[in-house]
Image: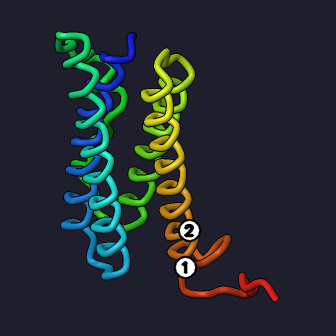
Amino acid sequence: MNELEALGLALEVEKNELELYLNLARKVKDKKAKNMFLFLAGQEFEHLKSFEEKFLEFAIEECKLPAVDKELLKKLIINVKGVESEVEALKIAMEQEKLTWEFYENAAKSAEKESVRRVFEELAKAEEEHYELLKAQYDSVMKTGIWMDYQDFNLEVE
């Protein structure tokens, strides 16, 4: 897959992740979970804008548009039908972020242009941060790990 194809696929992934988080926000009843999914939808919208800019710049330079690999896109997008609980929603969202994060890391490694590599690296880091946010919420709901509502240590530097 070349850089232009990877950028085109990334555009589709970000569109689908935006839709994923909006759908999950509609499905969950817990206000904190709903707000977190809406926050992540906003983040995905910002990623989409970044990819659109880079994609258009690159497409104009190359004077062509890529075909999106539909089979790979199917593998990178998780279906949210049938989600009944916050726990299910969080598991799906974590899995989605991990898939995207890994895809962006691999795309960055194979990018030839520095500017394209940088975009993928930045977004891989953002997807990793999304995963960590979701994991913290999952731990809170499951009452394991570090909880979102409780901090038993101080993060301030003295």
> What residue sits 26% from the left and 44% below the top?
48
Find residue 132 and report its image quarter: bottom right
Q: Quadrant of the N terminus?
A: top left
Crowd tier of the residue under label 1, counting other residues whose Cα lies within 10 Å: few below 14, some 14–19, many 20 or above:
some
Tag 2 and tag 1, C-beta contact below 8 Å: yes
Report the number of numbered marks.
2
> What residue sits 22% from the left and 48% below the top?
81
Viewer-proximal residue among 53 and 10: 53
Crowd tier of the residue under label 2, counting other residues whose Cα lies within 10 Å: few below 14, some 14–19, many 20 or above:
many
Residue 123: % across, % down = 45, 43
Q: Provide the secondary structure element on which disc 1 rests.
A: loop
> What residue sits 27% from the left and 70% below the top?
28
Q: Which residue is mark 2?
A: 136
Viewer-proximal residue among 146 and 38: 38
Find residue 146 and report its image quarter: bottom right
Distance of mark 2 from mark 1, alpha carbons? Answer: 6 Å
Find residue 148 and report its image quarter: bottom right
Earlier in the chain: of badge 2 and badge 1, it is: 2
Q: Provide the secondary structure element on which disc 2 rests.
A: helix
The answer to whether 105 appears left or right of 79 in the picture is right
Residue 76: % across, % down = 36, 31
Amino acid carrying label 2: it is Ala
Amino acid carrying label 1: it is Met
Q: Which residue is mark 1?
A: 148
Residue 43: % across, % down = 34, 58
